[in-house]
Amino acid sequence: MHNSQRRDGSPSIVEVARAAGVSTATAGRVLGGYGQTSPASRTKVEEAAQRLGYRPNGLARSLIHGSTETVGVIVTDIGNSFFASAVRAVTDAVRAAGYEILLANTDSDPAAEQRALKVMWEKRVDGLVIAPQGPGSAERLRAMAEAGLPIVLLDRPLAALPQADQVTINNTACARSAVGHLTRLGHRRIAVVSEAAQELERLLDAPAGEGGDEPPSAARLVGYLAALRRAGLDPDPALVVHSPYDRHAAERTVRRLLRRNPDVTAVFCTDNVLSSGAVAALQDSGKSCPEEISLVGFDDQDWTTLVRPRLTVVRQPRRELGTAAGRQLIARLTDRGQARAGADAAELPGPGAEGTGAPEGGRPEPETATGERIVLKGRLVTRDSTGPAPGPRPASG
Amino acid sequence: MHNSQRRDGSPSIVEVARAAGVSTATAGRVLGGYGQTSPASRTKVEEAAQRLGYRPNGLARSLIHGSTETVGVIVTDIGNSFFASAVRAVTDAVRAAGYEILLANTDSDPAAEQRALKVMWEKRVDGLVIAPQGPGSAERLRAMAEAGLPIVLLDRPLAALPQADQVTINNTACARSAVGHLTRLGHRRIAVVSEAAQELERLLDAPAGEGGDEPPSAARLVGYLAALRRAGLDPDPALVVHSPYDRHAAERTVRRLLRRNPDVTAVFCTDNVLSSGAVAALQDSGKSCPEEISLVGFDDQDWTTLVRPRLTVVRQPRRELGTAAGRQLIARLTDRGQARAGADAAELPGPGAEGTGAPEGGRPEPETATGERIVLKGRLVTRDSTGPAPGPRPASG
């Protein structure tokens, strides 16, 4: 319905051949990129094609070859710096193999994810890199996975879709390390701001695992709980506060948390947006950081070294995550599972399987039925926003 | 070459019809979305299609309809927060009209831009939103524009490609406002950190225009010069310093600037990455801000209110820029120029033609040959990083 003018006006191979003074067959070979032609003919055809504005028909070629050389990338929000970095890296990795990306955002909305998947499917992407919206995503992805579409889960595992490859970071270990840093500094009243706070009861009751099958927020909450237990502390549900994924909401949440629990001496935030909200709340709280209250953020964004005090954070290998996901998909596409991207991932700075005896590492996997699990390592970067827990108030005041 | 297994294994309309117990013609009508069928047949066909994993062939449909319902989006770097926000908005705007986006990054490399354009062309995108790499982009885009491909220039104008639509902000007026704020505070030695510093001589010699045809960096430098002149100040080339688009390079540049020119009392940065480098340099300079030195940044990122002092910035309507670009492209696609997106843009918060008598506003434009020029307004947000110029040193020290 659109652009019939342009499409109708585009010259055919016959016209290019005529303008170049060669046979249609020769022009077809040059423009189609197959068979042999003399360098002179090639030059003549290419010049004529450019002069006439010939447009190679990638659609027809895709129908013939059965490949669109396009991969779908579905994330929560490309406007979020974490996904912006990761998607940039996915793009570079697949581009190096000749693939372009079709991009869609879901805003964590199941209906938007469903629409995006339908479009990607109809546009015949050769594979998919997706940060799934939630557990329900497994159902939405199953038919495509079973039809043989290579799928790489970015940042978020899906236990119910074992056939997909996953590239995640060791979220639980990262959170344990962050909160362990606080307990070693003597903190006892440590709050956590998490999108998964509502799942606290389930996570408390769950067997003490590594959280490897949980989405990032829940996996980080598991790490928080594990670090408290290791320090002999009982988790206090009042200090596990929920915030939606919004800086201003997080700011209000942290302000309320500190007002209601004046004995809190440390706060751990489980992602970048929540971290910025917490920094804003702390600045307005009148409490000095780190003398009265310590803060650990998640995801080392540019601003974390511009604020004062400089923010202690868990640094996520965002770009490496995207690179590993892109390479894993390409490995599936070029070798349908024979090429193992794990070897590629090992070349990246900082990745590797989690050295914690995580169940996923030890489970025997039938190669054909189960996807790869690539776990990259985040790490704690200690700066000035964390310090020793303040002494008892009566003594110091 | 890829995925022949999946593609070969995908069921045909004939198989779906057989499984649904209807004629092939009926199945074709339901799956192709044309003609009339009974609700009962429709349900049977849709269920069979889902059960068998039938994959609608979007490629074949695109060949028939002459539209891929895909638009190309080419930016410098989706990892940069400015483009991340703008692209998110482009995506939403075109998605609302049923279009998906193919994304590519150029890193300001002409060769990468050329490759991206070739791919977009071959994939038969219906239109293009592009932040052109530089003046050379006009040559690269000309053939496509002349073939009738709708092109919207995002953030960066191209004087040599008048047939393309442009969506930019009033960069010159924004910079004039930022530097005017500083001159009114009494500053006389005002430095500027700019990617376009090397073009200073050309811009000094140019007639005092509005910079509307210049790329953003140069347009902002024009605004800086205009504000100085308005305040009766002569530009000092030593205070116009160049930095590449990199925070750490900008930090080194500003550190050197302040060391060599201890009389500088204010710094204006012309984009977000340079601003973050300048903040870092100032923090390490030992000078107090704003008492000894004032700072104005460009682009209101999240961190600008987290640093202390809070940063005075020019706020760019990033999302609105992307929205206007996406809507303008859709207007071209759905009505081939009869629908004027200017009316849509007027609904956005804060946009509008520059009210400064800019030449582009007054030039009579033949509707068919010249693209629209949509100029959105940025504005100065004054915070704590700018203050009165310090008094003469001898008197105060």
Image (spheres, coloured by chain):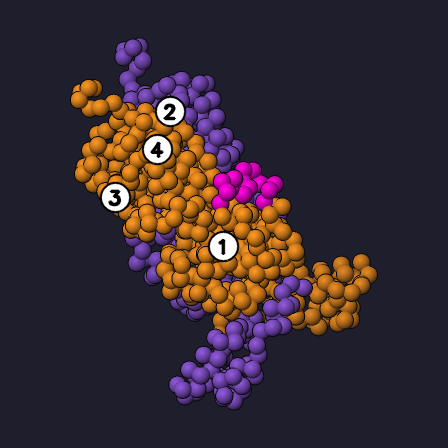
Chain colours: A purple, B orange
Q: Does the rendering let one see residue B81? A: no
Q: Secondary structure at mark 4?
A: loop
Disc 2 target residue? A283
In the image, residue B346 lies in the stretch drawn in magenta:
yes
Q: Are marks 1 and 4 on the same chain?
A: yes
Q: Nearer the viewer, residue B99 or B168?
A: B168
The x and y percentages for residue A211 are 43, 43
Q: Is residue B332 above or below residue A234?
A: below
Camera-nearest residue between B376 and A188: B376
- Residue at 78% across / 65% down in the picture? B35
Was residue B187 drawn as part of the magenta stretch in this picture?
Answer: no
Sequence order check: which comes first, mark 1 or mark 3? 1
Contact, mark 2 vs mark 3 (Cβ under 8 Å): no
Reading the image, the residue beneath label 1 is B153
Q: Is residue A41 visible?
A: yes
**Callouts 4 and 3 in the same chain:** yes
A90 left or right of A124 in image: left
Between tags 4 and 3, which lies in front?
4
| Marks 4 and 3 in Cβ contact (< 8 Å) | no
Which chain hosts label 2?
A
- The answer to whether dots 1 and 2 both sit on one chain is no
Q: Are marks 2 and 3 on the same chain?
A: no
Residue to which mark 3 is pinned: B237
Nearest to viewer (mark 1 / mark 4): 4
**Label ID, residue B231:** 4
Are the numbered discs 2 and 4 placed on the same chain, yes or no?
A: no
Above or below, B295 against B137 in this view is: above
Q: Chain of mark 1?
A: B
Q: Which residues are magenta?
A: B345-358
